[in-house]
Structures are given as structure tokens and as C-alpha cells.
Amino acid sequence: MDMQLPLLDRLFAAGLLIDTGVDGLYGRSGAFEDVITRFEAVIDSLGGVDKPEAIRFPPGMNRAHFEGSGYMKSFPQLAGTIHSFCGCELDHVSLLTCMEEGKDWTGQQQATDIVLTPAACYPLYPTIAKRGALPAGGGLFDLQSYCFRHEPSKEPTRMQLFRMREYVRMGKPTDVVAFRQDWMERGTKLMESVGLPVEIDVANDPFFGRAGKMYKNNQRNQNLKFELLIPVNANAGPTACMSFNYHQDHFGKTWGLTTEDGETAHTACVGFGLERIALALFKHHGLDVNEWPAHVRQTLWG
Ligand code: ATP
Ligand code: ZN
Ligand code: MG
């Protein structure tokens, strides 16, 4: 394999990712998927001992829940909405004419009740709030979802549709912060067990616009987000493969989520970027899993 080629081209050539003609939108081979499946099993073996409640949402979420979450205040540039044709027969004729003439036909599409999920945990908070107050000790959830972000890129680590595995903790501030701390340590050990070099640093999200500067400073000054970074791309800084987020009472207030004694619940989430982790493994150990170091193969395949 020509090591001079960009990583994305090497992944295409090896058949691990499949080009669709759109940057950041790829098919995955069976070998690529197997790495993700095996890595998730290792995550389960660490996180399963805490007996989280597993929930799987599809990659689209209730638009009203999305609107309530405040995502459009922070990241309007990343969001994706689902639009459908809602016209009559006459509208259909003009739609087809538009398409035949190569004109823009999408103006006829109308917003549906569904938007694309921007992060695996967004559908969870309103869902759990609807159940009523949290039980004693709070809540712990295990999530996985495809997520959409409109950030087309030639870097394979920045996709438009990718999977996030998350654990979410809800409850008293001390419990929630301890959960996040615990996963920073577990995450570091986990990556070391599959032969990946890591560093942890405070993170900055790309909050939109002038008002976003305030969010950015707040996030940094209050240590609300940490990232676990692994070098993947050549000529670029290391890539965030996990993130550790403390939302304070943001989602608790937004959705009326309370602890058993009626206090506003605090929340934190820990997210694994599954494609990024797979890419880090391919980058560090080679594109053929059969050639990976024995201890790494042992951890993943037993
Ligand atoms: P970055 O700073 O690289 O844009 P992020 O801070 O936006 O990452 P989070 O919002 O914390 O990422 O999402 C949780 C995890 O999902 C990240 O740690 C990363 O591993 C993964 N992730 C985020 N954006 C992408 C993407 N565009 N493609 C693939 N994985 C992603
Ligand atoms: Zn989350
Ligand atoms: Mg981002």
C-alpha cells in the first residue's frame, strides 16, 4: 500500500470505506464493521458492570425535542432536518419538470416532524423526564446511534453520518461528576489496552457566531468538556475519539428532569466516536486486522 496516499484514499483502496461521491458519507466493509462490533463488546465489558439501562433510538428524533434542546442556538451550521414532498398532483408535475430540467426541486420539500439526531443522547433527556422523577441514586443509560452533522470533509475522521456510543448519567451533581471522572480513567485504560496512544485535554466546541464566544469561554473556564485525543491524521493535531461532557443542570432545567427529592437533576455524558476509534486502530496497526499486534487482537477478538 502506498503510504504517501491520503488516509481516506488508502481506506477506499483497501475497501474498508466505500466512496458514495459525497464527502463524509461512506459505506463500511464487513471488516470495518467487525472492528466496531468487537470494540463495542470491550466497552460493554467495562460499562456493563454498572448495569445501565440500554436504549436504542433511530438516527432521527422528534423535531419538538430537538427544538427544545437549544441545539440551534449553538450549532445551527451542523444540524440536518428531514423534508418530504407534501404537495398535490399538480405540485408533483412541477416537481418532476424541475428535476427533468435540472433545476432545484428541493424547494418543494416541506419540513417533517423528524430531524436528524446530532448526538446520541439528545432524544434521551425528554424521554426520561416524561417518566417522572428519577429513582433514588439517579439514572444510568447506554445509547448508540448514527448521528448527523453537516461538516463535509476529506478527513475520514470527520464524517457527516457516524456512530456515537454513549453512557449518560443523571442525578446529583457529585454522582454525575464522579461518573465522568471515572470514565476518563476507564477510557484511557481502554485505549491503552488496544495499543492506542492517548492524551486528555479540555475541549472547545465550535459554537456559532458572536454569542457563541460566551458559550465557548464558559465551557472552557468551567471544564465542562474533556476530550480523549489520539493521533490519526497526518499533518494535523490528534483527533477527539471520546468526549466527557458535564451539562450541569442544562438538560434538567430544559426538560423538568428531577431527582427523587425534587431537585433539578444534573447530567453528564461520555461519548465514544466509533468510526474514529476504528480509524485510529487501522492507522496505528495497519489496514489488515490479521496483521495487528497479538495483544490487540486478543483484547478485541479474545
Ligand atoms: P470535534 O471537535 O472533532 O468536532 P466534537 O467535539 O464535535 O468533535 P462531540 O460532539 O463531543 O465531538 O461528539 C462525541 C464524539 O463523536 C467525539 O468525541 C468524536 O469521537 C465523535 N465525532 C464527532 N464529530 C464527528 C464526525 N464528524 N465524524 C466522526 N466522528 C465524530
Ligand atoms: Zn451526549
Ligand atoms: Mg465537532
Image (cartoon, rainbow, N blue to C red):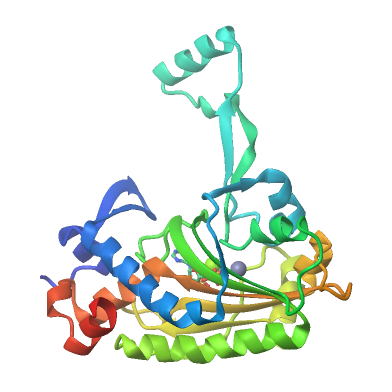
Residue at the far right in the pictured view: 262
State the quadrant of the C terminus. Answer: bottom left
Give the total number of marks visible in the rendering: 0
Viewer-closest of 125 and 18: 125
Residue 223, above or below 133: below
Residue at the far left in the pictured view: 1
Where does the image place residue 242, in percent across and percent down from the top left? 49, 77
> Would you say 245 lies left or right of 280 here?
right
Where does the image place residue 76, in percent across and percent down from the top left? 65, 54
> Would you say 211 lies left or right of 162 here?
right
Residue 302, above or below 18: below
Q: Which residue lies at the image location 72% right of the left edge and 68% below the top edge? A: 212
User: Is residue 21 something that shows in the picture?
Assistant: yes
Where does the image place residue 109, in percent across and percent down from the top left? 58, 28
Q: Which residue lies at the image location 68% right of the left edge and 44% below the top edge? A: 63
Instruction: Write down the quadrant of residue 114 in the picture.
Output: top right
Residue 212, above or below 65: below
State the quadrant of the N terminus. Answer: bottom left
User: Is residue 201 something that shows in the picture?
Assistant: no
Can you tell me which quadrant of the image ligand 2 is in? bottom right
Instruction: Write down the quadrant of residue 270 in the picture.
Output: bottom right
> Would you say 81 lies left or right of 297 here?
right
Viewer-closest of 71 and 264: 264
Where does the image place residue 225, in percent across and percent down from the top left? 63, 80
Q: Which residue lies at the image location 21% right of the left edge and 63% below the top edge? A: 31
Q: Which residue lies at the image location 77% right of the left edge and 84% below the top edge? A: 173
Instruction: Write down the quadrant of residue 198 in the picture.
Output: bottom left
Viewer-closest of 102 and 269: 269
